[in-house]
Amino acid sequence: NVASLAGFGTTTGRDAYTGAKGAVLALTKSTAREYAADRVRVNAIAPAAVRTERIEKLIATVPAARETVKAQALGLIEPSEIAYAAIFLAADESRSITGQIIAVNGGLFE
C-alpha cells in the first residue's frame, strides 16, 4: 500500500486527506495480521513530500509548503526512492516483514 506521512495524523487543515491515509495505515496492519498465516505480506510506504511537478509549483508559490519541505532535512524525496522501497518490500529478502509502515520521510518526523 502507499499512504503518506500525513496518515500519522498530524497534518493541519487537511482532515479528509489525513483521515484517508490513516485508514490506509490501519488497513495495512489489520490485513497483515489477518493474512499472515497464509504467508501473505502486507506493508505500506508512507512518504513525505515527493519531487513532482505539483509539489515543485507549491514550493514556489506557497510559503507553508516551502517550510514543510525545509523541515525535511534530506530534502524532497525522489520518486525512485519510493520505487526502491516497494522493490525491497516485494523481494524475498523482506519475507519476514509484514504489517509495517516504511516512512520514506527525508528526515521529517511527524
Image (spheres, rainbow, N blue to C red):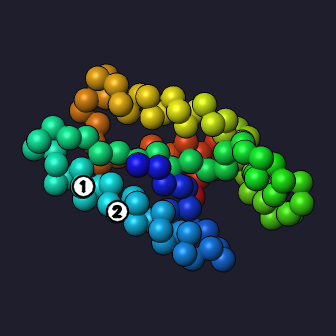
Rendered location of residue 101, percent (x, y): 41, 48
Residue at x-position 80% and y-position 64%: 64
Residue at x-position 45% and y-position 34%: 86
Rendered location of residue 98, percent (x, y): 27, 42
Q: In which quarter of the image is the C terminus?
A: bottom right
Left or right placement of residue 81 versus residue 29 in this view? right
Determine the image quadrant of residue 77: top right
Determine the image quadrant of residue 14: bottom right
State which tag comes first along the sequence, 1 or 2. 2
Residue at x-position 24% and y-position 55%: 31
Q: Can you name the residue that lies furthest to the right here?
A: 61
Left or right placement of residue 4 versus residue 58 in this view? left
Q: Which amino acid does label 2 sit on?
A: Ala
Q: Can you name the residue that lies furthest to the top here?
A: 93
Determine the image quadrant of residue 107: top right
Q: What element carries label 1?
A: helix
Using the image, tell me which numbered label, if any, was put on residue 26: 2
Using the image, tell me which numbered label, if any, was put on residue 89: none
Residue at x-position 29% and y-position 23%: 92
Left or right placement of residue 22 versus residue 4 in this view? left
Question: Is residue 73 visible in the rendered structure shown here?
Answer: no
Crowding at mark 1 (Cα within 10 Å: few <14, some 14-19, many 20+): some
Q: Which amino acid does label 1 sit on?
A: Thr
Q: Is mark 2 on a helix, strand or loop?
A: helix
Rendered location of residue 48, percent (x, y): 61, 50
Crowding at mark 2 (Cα within 10 Å: few <14, some 14-19, many 20+): some
Name the residue beneath numbered marker 1: 31
Question: Is residue 30 visible in the rendered structure shown here?
Answer: yes
